[in-house]
Image: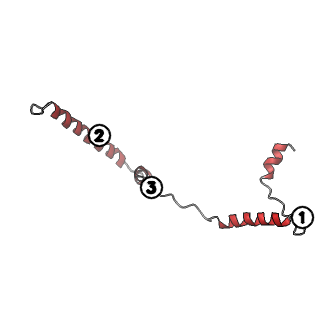
Amino acid sequence: MSYITRRALSTLIPPKIASPNAIGAAKDAARMERVVNFYARLPRGPAPEPKPTGLLERYGERYFGKNPSAAPIFHVIAGLLALGYGMDYYFHLRHHKNHPH
């Protein structure tokens, strides 16, 4: 068996737990106890659903999340109309006869 194969398989096989009478067993037992305690403290079950935090994340969650809708299309149309009206109004006033420019 090649070195690479042995190295890959060694991650799948748990380390041997030394008997209490073996030299250095306390060190190994303490290390295994820390590993067991670490895994015992991990949360169980499915991960909680992440909550959107920013403005764009909340907008995306609302309109593109579980129940997508066509509202963003209407929001874009309304935004373009408002922007166009504002530009028309501004440029009309720039060339108005009473405007001091």
Residue visible at 85% across and 65% down in the picture: 25
Amino acid type at image mark 2: Leu
Position of 84 relative to 67 (above/below)? above
Position of 90 relative to 32 (above/below)? above
Residue where numbered disc 3 is placed: 53
Q: Quadrant of the N terminus?
A: top right
Label 3 secondary element: loop
Position of 24 relative to 57 (above/below)? below
Locate residue 95: give its quadrant.
Answer: top left
Label 2 secondary element: helix
Amino acid type at image mark 1: Ile
* Res 80 label: 2
Mark 3 vs mark 1, foreground winner is 1
Mark 2 vs mark 1, foreground winner is 1
Instruction: Give whichever of discs 3 and 1 has the lower sequence position.
Output: 1
Locate residue 101: give its quadrant.
Answer: top left
